[in-house]
Amino acid sequence: MDCIFCKIVNKQIPSALVYEDPNFLAFLDISPANKGHALVIPKQHYETYTDLPDNVLKELAVVTKKVAEAINKSLNPDGLNIFMNNKQAAGQIVPHAHYHIVPRFKNDGIRFEWPHKKYDDGENKVYAEKIRNSMQ
Ligand code: AMP
Ligand code: ZN
């Protein structure tokens, strides 16, 4: 598999390791939003959030929290952004599911923004119903 994060898991390429256990790994992003920006991955290759089996997702969430707490303790940021990009349209570059943990500091100049679009009258109910009806 020609996946850069699988190569990090297999130690074929180096990383600045933050956490490792038999199933998960956390390491520093090579091109960080702020210093200390970490990535948390399952060692097994899954492409996106919804591809993750529930048990893997649950454990990944717990590992992500552990890393987030350590970043808070060691770097004392004013805040954290924790997120995952899924598929190219959402900004995913590496197709191996990963949480970003970005330590944030007041006035660090980073902006997570969206255009705050508006629903037409009643359209939000239609969207909510569509989603509700697709839930398993
Ligand atoms: P995404 O856009 O969510 O797929 O994020 C991929 C992230 O992986 C980017 O922020 C890259 O800077 C980071 N990245 C790419 N290659 C490496 C690498 N070899 N080691 C650490 N981080 C990497
Ligand atoms: Zn992979």
Image (tube, rainbow, N blue to C red):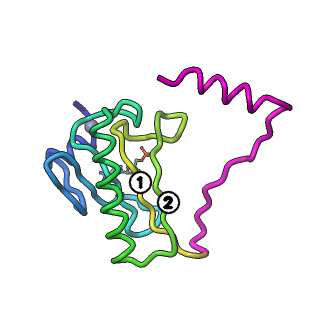
User: Which residue corresponds to the image point at 36% horizontal and 30% vertical from the top-left?
Assistant: 51
User: Considering the image in quadrants, where does the N terminus appear?
Assistant: top left
Disc 2: which residue: 81
User: Which residue corresponds to the image point at 33% horizontal and 34% vertical from the top-left?
Assistant: 52
Let me know if residue 76 is in the magenta part: no
Residue 35 vs residue 131: left or right?
A: left
Q: Find numbered disc 1 in the image and state the secondary structure of the residue it sits on.
A: strand
User: Which residue corresponds to the image point at 35% horizontal and 54% vertical from the top-left?
Assistant: 39
Disc 1: which residue: 100
Let me know if residue 126 is in the magenta part: yes
Q: Are marks 2 and 1 in contact (CB under 8 Å)?
A: yes
Residue 21 vs residue 91: left or right?
A: left
Above-or-below relation of 84 to 123 = below
Above-or-below relation of 21 to 58 = below
Disc 2 marks a residue whose amino acid type is Asn
| Magenta stretch, overall SS | loop
Count of number-bearing discs: 2
- Is ligand 1 within 8 Å of the beta carbon of the residue shown at mark 1? yes
